[in-house]
């Protein structure tokens, strides 16, 4: 079954829609989604404000009806807006079209770690600024990438390992638990450039040890009996820092589904041209002493 998503601005004249494509507007120019929703809310009920792409400067404002969208278009398009610090917005009507999102195998996606209720999982939004993000991306792009089958990677450090991975759209990460015997209890992952979702599984019956990942793992897992694991998902926006510790790090498999579009709450979010993750781990000296021996390659 298809779900609506927003596509390129509608070219042509006269036709309206309840959805506005708004340029020169978004978190990258200092306007939060809440601020945008409140400014546009003056013209009618706003159903949602979504990123139009991964630029941070273009959003979709979605109203319940065309009349509100027309009123906002008339009032805000091309005029400096005092509620937005004098900024002039460029607005076009946006179309809704059918996207290819597989809904038969989806799990609700949370936007905060506390909703997920996985002990030891933390997500900090806006951990770095847009400027720091730009500098970090420029720094890694100035160094050589190692090409893997579907992604590119750079490795740094010894005692502390820093891995930088670049994922093109539609490329994810197969389910795994980071090997207990190799790294200590904290795994940090900074997401830059494009957004994605991360899913988590905890096997409740039987034992499922961490093993080397392969491209077929996700398919194998999906075809397994779904009643033997808990499954949860979280949205990782650009510039957010994820921390896996405790149970989240030791007992839950994590992976990134191979999607080009993720459904988050009521909106569909397109993966950007690239997502770059910085993963920081500390190399473990001696055996793992975690409290999750059934998931532990050190204590088996
Ligand atoms: Zn362990």
Image (tube, rainbow, N blue to C red):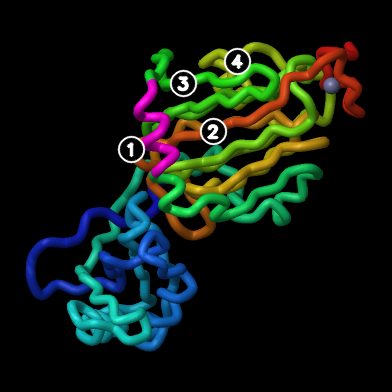
Disc 1 element = loop
Disc 4 element = loop
Image quadrant holding the N terminus, namely: top left
Q: Residue at x 64, y 55 (%)?
A: 112
Q: Which residue is mark 1?
A: 273
Label annotation for residue 213: 4
Q: Which residue is mark 3?
A: 153
Q: Residues within 10 Å of mark 4 (few under 14, many from 20)?
A: few
Q: Position of residue 6 (x, y in %)?
A: 31, 57
Q: Earlier in the sequence, mark 1 or mark 2?
A: 1
Image quadrant holding the C terminus, namely: top right
Vertical comparison of 157 with 261: above or below: above
Report the number of discs: 4
Indicate left or right for 218 with 253 as reference. Answer: left
Q: Earlier in the sequence, mark 1 or mark 4?
A: 4
Q: Which residues are magenta?
A: 135-143
Label annotation for residue 256: none
Q: Earlier in the sequence, mark 3 or mark 2?
A: 3
Using the numbered discs, state the Cα–Cα distance from disc 2 to disc 4 in whole angstroms. Answer: 19 Å
Comparing marks 2 and 4, which lies closer to the viewer? 2
- Ligand 1 under 8 Å from disc 3 Cβ: no
Q: Which residue is mark 2?
A: 278
Using the numbered discs, state the Cα–Cα distance from disc 1 to disc 2 in whole angstroms. Answer: 17 Å
């Amino acid at each position: 079954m298809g779900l609506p998503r927003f596509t390129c601005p509608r070219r042509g004249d006269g036709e309206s829609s309840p959805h506005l494509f708004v340029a020169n507007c978004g978190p990258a120019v200092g306007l939060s989604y809440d601020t945008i929703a409140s400014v546009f809310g003056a013209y009618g009920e706003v159903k949602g404000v979504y990123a139009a792409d991964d630029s941070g400067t273009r959003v979709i404002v979605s109203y319940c009806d065309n009349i509100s969208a027309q009123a906002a278009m008339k009032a805000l398009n091309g005029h400096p807006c005092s509620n937005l610090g004098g900024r002039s917005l460029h607005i076009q009507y946006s179309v809704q079209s059918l996207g290819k999102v597989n809904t038969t195998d989806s799990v609700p996606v949370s936007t905060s770690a506390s909703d997920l209720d996985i002990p030891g999982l933390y997500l900090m939004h806006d951990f770095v600024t847009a400027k720091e993000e730009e500098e970090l991306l420029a720094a890694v792009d100035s160094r050589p990438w190692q090409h893997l089958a579907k992604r590119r990677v750079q490795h740094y450090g010894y005692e502390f390992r820093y891995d930088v991975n670049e994922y093109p759209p539609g490329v994810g990460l197969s389910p795994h638990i980071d090997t207990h015997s190799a790294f200590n209890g904290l795994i940090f992952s900074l997401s830059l450039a494009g957004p994605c979702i991360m899913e988590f599984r905890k096997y409740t019956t039987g034992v499922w040890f961490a093993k080397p990942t392969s491209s077929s793992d996700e398919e194998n897992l999906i075809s397994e009996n779904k009643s033997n694991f808990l499954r949860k998902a979280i949205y990782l926006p650009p510039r957010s820092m994820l921390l896996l510790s405790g149970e989240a790090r030791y007992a839950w498999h994590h992976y990134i589904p191979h999607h080009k579009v993720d459904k988050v709450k009521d909106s569909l979010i397109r993966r950007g041209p690239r997502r770059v993750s910085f993963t920081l781990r500390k190399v473990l000296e001696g055996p793992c002493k975690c409290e999750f021996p059934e998931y532990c390659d050190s204590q088996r």
